[in-house]
Amino acid sequence: MSSNPKNMSRADQVRARRKIEKVQRKPIPRSENRGAREMSNASRVVSRHNTYRSSSAHVTSTKQRRQVYLPTGTPGSEVRLPTLPRISFSWRWLSAILMVAAVVVLYMMLNADTFRVNTVNLTGGIRVPSEEVKAMLNVTGESIIHVNPSQVEKQILATFPDIKSALVEVALPDSLNVVIVERIPAILWIENEQELFWIDQDGFTFSVRGEANLPIRVYANSTPPFALGYVEPIAVLPGEEPEEDELPERVPAIDPNFVSTVQKLNTIKPAETIMLYDSANGLGWTDPHGWQVYFGTQTEDIDMKLVEYSYIVEAILDRNLQPVLISMEFLHAPYYRLEH
């Protein structure tokens, strides 16, 4: 009779268990459904990968080629033409085409006779002969690309002092338009009965040529007072083409205040007298009483000088004197000189 396991001690149970033959463990069987599912998943991964590649190739082929269908006139039927490659252009292609076109156009403008200066249209000149300006420019036959309007303007102003401003424009294919503005003479400077030059309102001097509208005639015994720091520039001869940095800067030779003084005194002096200039005493005129009066070269205090001059004239006439010169150059130090 076998013993009841419940009545056996723990040690007896262990010894009894050791006597039992060892059981071989078998692997846990997998269900058929699970294996089929894993195989199906693996198949799907491979199929998905292949499908992706096939789709990409198809898209690429669709982008590269375009199918064209033509109707045959029969309902439900059409003819497919051979596939045509699809060509796409990018902005780089457009930039390259524009660059090549620009190079071709530039080459033609530099070498073709069509783009060589053939006509110079000059307007605005009255006293300055247009032939002189055109001869100085000397651009006929030159490529229109080589003409620098700014350089031409500076060259005109440096060569012709009687031109106040110049505007040069290029008109394709072969013309050059030049618009000039001449200076208006304000003073005609006369020395030893010889007309030397004109002076405009800004103090620029230029040669006398043609006619002018009533400039003030000044009879002098010397050249006019030059502006402070003025240095006479080197003249540019016709036909010369100096560099841009060699062109002389346009600065007035005469102080504009001196021009204003001449114009002011011209409205004061007696109408029948002429304007005089003396290097020692300045501007003046011959008084109707026979002597010469000078007021210097500045317009400051001119009204007070005139009042003071009237008192001096009255005093001289009361004393029955006949001076040869009265100087009003300095307001607080006037004087007169009697004839020896």
Image (tube, rainbow, N blue to C red):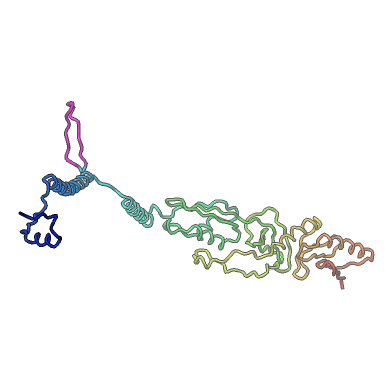
**Residue extending farthest bottom:** 340
- Name the residue rendered at 74%, 58% in the picture: 263
> x and y percent of residue 189 in the render?
69, 62
Count of numbered badges drawn on the protein? 0
Q: Main secondary structure of the magenta part?
A: strand
> x and y percent of residue 299 in the render?
77, 62
Looking at the rendering, which quadrant does residue 66 occupy? top left
Residue 221, compared with residue 143, is above or below; it is below
- Quadrant, the N terminus: bottom left
Answer with left or right where residue 285 lies relative to residue 121.
right
Q: Which residues are magenta?
A: 66-83
> x and y percent of residue 83 in the render?
18, 41
Residue 165, compared with residue 89, is above or below; it is below
- Name the residue rendered at 14%, 60% in the picture: 9
- Quadrant, the C terminus: bottom right
**Residue extending farthest right:** 318
> x and y percent of residue 276 in the render?
76, 63
- Name the residue rendered at 72%, 58% in the picture: 216
Taking depth in this image into account, of 68 and 189 the one nearest to the observer is 68
Answer with left or right where residue 180 lies relative to residue 253.
left
Q: Is residue 151 magenta?
A: no
- Name the residue rendered at 64%, 64% in the picture: 252
Answer with left or right where residue 315 lies relative to residue 151.
right
**Residue extending farthest top:** 75
Q: Is residue 76 magenta?
A: yes
Looking at the rendering, which quadrant does residue 221 occupy? bottom right
